[in-house]
Image: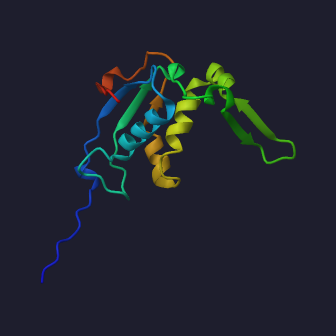
Amino acid sequence: MKYQKTWTATPDQIDRKWYVVDAEGMVLGRLASQVAAILRGKNKPTFTPHYDTGDYVIVINADKVVLTGNKEDQKEYQRYSGYSGGQKITKFKDMKAKKPEFIVTHAIEGMLPHNKLGRAMAKKLRVYAGSEHGHESQMPEVLELN
């Protein structure tokens, strides 16, 4: 009896595209999960779990992303320096005013694999607070997310 081998993508078979996603009025978590799937390549028939088959994504208007419920007032971002008393807590509203790109990047990277492969996928993400980006030469396609 002959068994069929499992098909696996190779680097020469990967066709990468550039997409632009407008985050204005979108819910942060839903935006992040859909963008993470595109970065992983799960929207393609050539998806291979152990290989980076994803596309490049440009997210614009990151400062206009929204949260549901009371998360706007309650959500916090924590970081820790490793020293005693070195924990810093920043409220969502303060972070949105100072670094709106970090909010979107942090959410998307949290939905990627936490290993070398995930870090390689995260390098294909570009996030901008305004509606301008410098990637016109890549001819990105506008992607409508629901």
Residue at point 41% right, 28% down? 58
Residue 39 in the figure: left or right of residue 88: left
Task: Where is residue 123? Give x, y as percent.
Answer: 46, 40
Q: Residue furthest bottom?
A: 1
| In this view, 124 is above or below 27 | below
Task: Where is residue 32? Give x, y as percent.
Answer: 46, 36
Residue at point 75% right, 35% down? 89
Q: Quadrant of residue 146?
A: top left
Task: Where is residue 110? Give x, y as percent.
Answer: 54, 44
| Number of callouts | 0
Q: Which of the two residues, 9 or 99, is positioned nearer the viewer here?
A: 99
Task: Where is residue 76? Give x, y as percent.
Answer: 68, 34
Q: Residue furthest top?
A: 131
Colouring of the image = rainbow
Q: Which of the two residues, 94 or 117, is positioned nearer the viewer here?
A: 94
Q: Quadrant of residue 20?
A: top left
Which image quarter holds the N terminus?
bottom left
Residue 92 in the figure: left or right of residue 112: right
Q: Residue furthest left?
A: 1
Q: Residue furthest right?
A: 84
Residue 22 in the figure: left or right of residue 70: left
Residue at point 29% right, 35% down? 17
| In this view, 19 is above or below 7 | above
Residue at point 43% right, 27% down? 59
Q: Which of the two residues, 133 or 88, is positioned nearer the viewer here?
A: 88
